[in-house]
Image: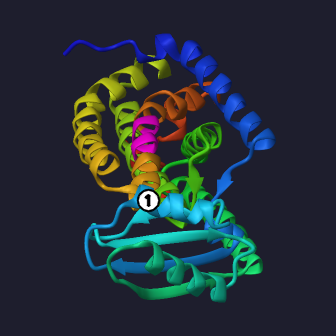
Amino acid sequence: MTILPFMKWRFVAAAISILAVAIAVGSLSVQQLNWGLDFTGGTLVEVEYAESADLNAIRGTLDSNGYQGAIVVSFGTDRDVLVRLPQGFSDDEGVAMVELLRNAASVDVALRRVEFVGPQVGDELREQGGLAMLLALGLVMLYVGFRFQFKFAVGAVVALVHDVLLVLGFFSLAGIEFDLTVLAALLAVIGYSLNDTIVVADRIRENFRKLRRISAVDVINVSLTETLGRTVVTSLTTLLVLSALALFGGEMIHGFAVALLLGVAIGTYSSMYVSATTLVAMGVSKDDVAIPIKEGLESDEAQP
């Protein structure tokens, strides 16, 4: 088997990652995220048309009648429409909007539901979402530190933070709406990236115990080469499904699919370069993963 020199390019990969993270953090600081109705508050109105609904006509009707900023998407079938009104519109205005749509349409429009999310609830959701991500990262560090070793835990958390920041930075730069579905996708990205990182870490630990006469960089190169096939096949099949969701899944899950699509692609890269490069930078060696010898066994071996 030909061993690929992954770590030969670790400095180039580190420079690219640092630059990308800096751009992401800069965008999040200056431009911030385009928070969705779940976080900012507003009114959600679901209506059902007797026939297929013309979304462009509905948007034009709402814009011309003072409902600027309304988001109109298809929900389920082509007859079900979901309208998201920004903060400042009450439940009563949501009902009035339905009357407006009835008058503008040549078919019957039935009101399915009206939900109002206050700004205070939106702020609480934002705080709880941030705490959920921090808690997930903390638990990951504890698990990997217990299961492997502290240096492996640091490498895993650095890779996960890298993945989350790049996905958030992309949403900030592109101005894509960030709602609860995207937050759920970010938590899924953490789990997916962790799975890849643990597979690589387990192989690195195993090879440190088997290949005792080569350097740490060579051990990591061997480990990454051995897991490359599994990583590429798993990621490609997942990316194919997510690409189909992003292209044909509709506007309701578009943000969710895009976040997962980016997260899986970035996570595949980070499991090979960010996590492994962090291990090399921290000076990982075979002593970090050596199996401790029990005192009783040590004394027995010392006896002639």
Question: In the rendered image of this protein, does residue 261 appear above or below residue 111?
Answer: above
Between 233 and 114, the residue placed more toward the observer is: 114
Between 155 and 112, the residue placed more toward the observer is: 112
Residue 35, image x, y percentages = 66, 58
Residue 192, image x, y percentages = 40, 51
**Three-letter code, disc 1:** Ala
Query: Magenta stretch mostly in which secondary structure?
Result: helix
Q: Residue at x 51, y 60 (%)?
A: 59
Q: Does residue 188 belong to the magenta stretch? A: no
Q: Residue at x 49, y 12 (%)?
A: 9
| Horizontal side, residue 67 vs residue 277: left or right | right
Which quarter of the picture shows residue 56?
A: bottom left
- Secondary structure at badge 1 equals helix
The quadrant of the rendering that contains the C terminus is top left
User: Can the viewer see residue 293 in this picture?
Assistant: no
Residue 168, image x, y percentages = 61, 45
Q: Residue at x 35, y 80 (%)?
A: 48
Range shown magenta: 261-267
Residue indicated by mark 1: 57
